[in-house]
Image (cartoon, coloured by chain):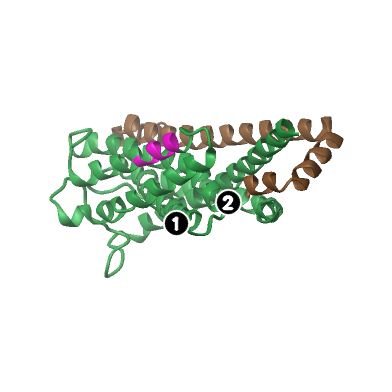
Chain colours: A brown, B green
Amino acid sequence: MAEFFAMGGYAAYVWSSYALAALVMVGLLVATLKALRGAETTLKALEGSRPPRRRRARNGAAASPAAEVGEG
Amino acid sequence: MHRFANPARFQRLSAAILPWTAGATVILLIVGLYIALIGSPRDYQQGDTVRIMYIHVPAAWMSLFVYVNMAIAAACGLVWKHPLADLFAKAAAPVGAGFTLICLVTGSLWGAPMWGTWWVWDARLTSVLILFFLYLGYMALVNAFDDPQRGTRAGNVLLLVGIVNVPIIKFSVDWWNTLHQPASVIRMGGPTIDGSMLVPLLVMALGFTAYFITVVLLRLRAEIVQRKIQTMRLTEAQG
C-alpha cells in the first residue's frame, strides 16, 4: 500500500495531477448543479407568485404589433 | 413562441438522457482510475510518471474536442440563429477551459521530472496556452454586453476565428522542433502505444467525454431556465 502511494518516488507529481483533475471536474459539477438549482427556484417563485399578471402582460404584448416586432 | 419550442423539447430529452450519461461517467471513471493507477504497468523509462498521461492526454483531447464542438455550434448559431446552438457554446466554454487547464498543469507536472523543466515556450505548449486564453476570452466577451444576443454573436465570431489554432495545436509537434513528443495514438498507421497503456487511456477519455456531456446538459438546462426568467422579468416590466 505504501508503495502504491509512493508512486516510485514520483508521488508529488502523480498525485497532484490526479488531485487537480478531480478538483476542477468536481468543482465545475458542483457549481453547475448550484446554478441549476438556483435558477429553478427563482423560476418557480416567479411562476408561482403572479400567474394572472403574466397572462395579462402577454395578451397585452400580443395585442400591440410593435411589441411583437420588437420581440422577434 | 416557436423560439421556445425547441428548448422545451430539449428539456424533456435531456431529462431522459442525463441519468445514463451520469451513470456512464461514474462507471467509466471508476474503471478508468483503477486500471490507470493499479491495473497498468509502469513505464520502463518514465516509471510511475506515465500515469500522469491518463489524465493529461484525455484532457488535451477534450480541450480540442470541446472547442471544435463550440465552433460548430457558433457557426450554426450565426447562420440559422438557433437559440440552443448559442447556449451550447456558452454552456460548454467553462468545461473546455477546465480541461485545458488540467492539460496544461498536468503537462507541467509531467515535464518537471521527465524533461527537467516545468515550461518551455515551444509550439505545442504555447498553442495550447493560446487555446486556454481563447476559452477565457470567449467567456469574458459573451458576458461583456448588456444585450446577451450581442454578446453571443461576438463570442461566436471569436470562436470561428480561433478555430485556426486547432490544426496548429494538432500538427505543432510535426511542424516544429519541440520538447513535446509526437502523436502516438491518433496517427497514420495506428497507435504506437502498448495495449496495456492504451486501454486505460481510452477508458479515461470515454469517461471524460461522458462527464462533458453530463455537465453540458446540466449547464444547458440552467441556461434555458435562466433565459425563461429573463423573458418573464422583461414581460413583467413591460406589462
Residue at disc 1, secondary structure: helix
Q: Residue at x 51, y 48 (%)?
A: B212
Secondary structure mostly seen in magenta is helix
Q: In the figure, is residue B55 to the left or right of A45? A: left
Q: Residue at x 74, y 33 (%)?
A: B236
Stretch of the chain drawn in magenta:
B134-141
Say which chain tag 2 marks.
Answer: B
In the image, what residue type sits under mark 2? Answer: Pro
Q: Tell me the CA gap for discs 2 and 1.
A: 12 Å
Closer to us: B27 or B38: B27
Image mark count: 2
Of callouts 2 and 1, which one flags the residue occurring earlier in the amino acid sequence? 1
Q: Residue at x 34, y 46 (%)?
A: B53
Give the position of the C terminus of chain B as an image quadrant. Answer: top right
In this rendering, does residue B58 appear at all?
no
Q: Which residue is mark 1?
A: B75
Quadrant in which residue A4 is drawn: top left
Residue at disc 2, secondary structure: helix
Q: Which residue is mark 2?
A: B83
